Image: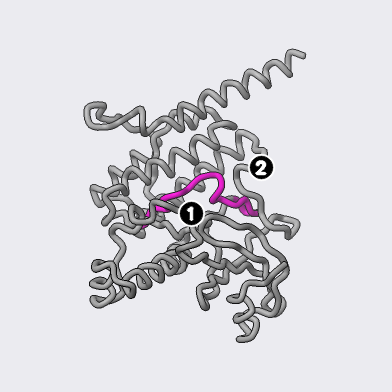
Amino acid sequence: MKTPASLLMLIDEGVIDEVLRPLKSGKEASVYVVRAGDDVRCAKVYKDMAQRSFQKRAQYQEGRKSRGSREARAVASGSRYGRKQQEAEWKNAEVDALYQLRAAGVRVPEPYGFFHGVLVMELVTDAEGFSAPRLGEVELTPEQAREYHAVLVRQVVRMLCCGLIHGDLSAYNVLVGPDGPVVIDFPQVVSAGGNNAARTMLLRDVNNLTATLGRWAPELLDTWYGEEMWVLFEAGTLLPDTPLTGQFTPDERSVDLDGVRDAINDARELALIRQQGREAQDED
């Protein structure tokens, strides 16, 4: 394994002591398992702009605030300094979100610091101490699916109360630890109040979770938690512990129901196929 130069810098500065192994590599960053003293953590090394394949960055950055007026002007002008500043803001977005969400009680990994473009944070593990699996990699009972769905919907609510939307939430961005699901990967986090696509992204996040967990508990596919919480958020009445029912009556004149519910309809078909397969096994 070739150790990235940025991690060697962290070793030289005493932030970490050893790089144990690579954990995963994605379109935005590569993650490594590292040791810091007696603790095993993970280090997220963000890729430079030229190396990244994520194409819709501008849509996600709408509504984010620059750290100063000079930086804001530079970003708006598209200058070299502005592009560099925009890149720094993109990398800082996840760090800032993790600290804010962790303080608000959202189930996210604990951050330990941001050094030379590397985010050092908690390594989420399973009950045996191995790297926790993603939500899409585990088999669930209907009861577990309902429990995980309730937990994750509550995390989305708490994020929204912080003015944030994950923006790319799915079974690939949720780890399953001993105490339940943990939400990860926030570089594309969206400003709920400053992004014109905020509502669409929120509904997509919730529908993705519902579609995944609805495979195990099909009754979840008939819930409308995203729409319900958005209406409460817009009215200024959504609180971190606001009870939700999952019931919502959409205005079919103003809502693209086909677009919003595509994931749910697909999941419903998968759930029916799964149920028919189980019934066939029972008959055998």
Give the Cα distance between marks 2 and 1.
Answer: 28 Å
Would you place residue 26 above or below residue 204 in this image?
Answer: below
Would you place residue 180 above or below residue 281 in this image?
Answer: below
- Say which amino acid is labelled 2: Val
Q: If you read the primary sequence from the N terminus, does the residue marked by circle 2 or circle 1 appear first?
A: 1
For label 1, the crowd category at 10 Å Cα-Cα, with few meaning under 14, some 14 to 19 and many 20 or more, is: few
Quadrant position of residue 80: bottom left
Foreground pick, 220 / 253: 253
Mark drawn on residue 4: none
Would you place residue 123 above or below residue 250 in this image?
Answer: below
Q: Which residue is mark 2?
A: 138
Q: Is residue 163 visible from the viewing direction of this image?
A: no
Q: Which residue is mark 1?
A: 53
- Say which amino acid is labelled 1: Ser
Q: Residue at x 47, y 40 (%)?
A: 208
The quarter in which the N terminus is drawn is bottom right
Residue located farthest toward the top when viewing the structure as drawn? 283
Q: Position of residue 253 (x, y in %)?
A: 22, 27
199 in magenta:
no
Foreground pick, 274 / 104: 274
Magenta segment: 163-180
Of labels 2 and 1, the one closer to you: 1
Q: Position of residue 269 (x, y in %)?
A: 53, 23
